[in-house]
Amino acid sequence: MNSTQTDLRDEIRQLAEEAFHMKLISGHGDGPDIEEYQIVYQGKPRHLPLEQARFFLMNLLYRNRVV
C-alpha cells in the first residue's frame, strides 16, 4: 500500500469514527480487499472503494451537521 492510499485510509477511518460516534453508522473497518473499506449503514455492511467510502462519509456527516 502506498503512502497516498495509507493517508486516504486514515482519513476515512477518522470520518468513520466521527460518523459512528454521531450514531450515523453502526460499524466500520477494513474491507476484505485492500482497496475497500467496510461501512455498516442502516444495518447492512457495505464494501466501498476507498474514494467512494470517503465521499459517502463526508456526505453523511455534512447532511447531519447542525447549522
Image: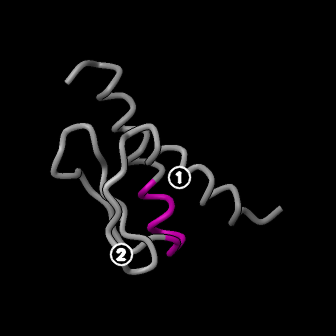
* Residue 20 belongs to magenta span: yes
Residue 10 placed where, x, y %? Answer: 35, 38
* Residue 19 belongs to magenta span: yes
Q: Main secondary structure of the magenta part?
A: helix
Q: Residue at x 34, y 69 (%)?
A: 27
Looking at the picture, does residue 23 appear above or below residue 39?
A: below
Looking at the picture, does residue 50 appear above or below residue 38?
A: above
Mark 2 secondary-structure assignment? strand
Magenta residues, as a range?
A: 16-24
Q: On the rendered image, what quadrant is the N terminus found in?
A: top left
Q: Which residue is denoted by mark 1 in the rendering?
A: 56
Residue 18 placed where, x, y %? Answer: 49, 58
Q: Residue furthest left?
A: 32
How crowded is the residue under tag 1: few (<14 C-alpha within 10 Å), some, or many (20+)?
A: some
Q: Residue furthest bottom?
A: 43
Q: On the rendered image, what quadrant is the C terminus found in?
A: bottom right
26 sits left or right of 37 in the view:
right
Mark 1 secondary-structure assignment? helix
| Corner quadrant of residue 66 | bottom right
Q: Amino acid at mark 2?
A: Lys
Q: Amino acid at mark 1?
A: Phe
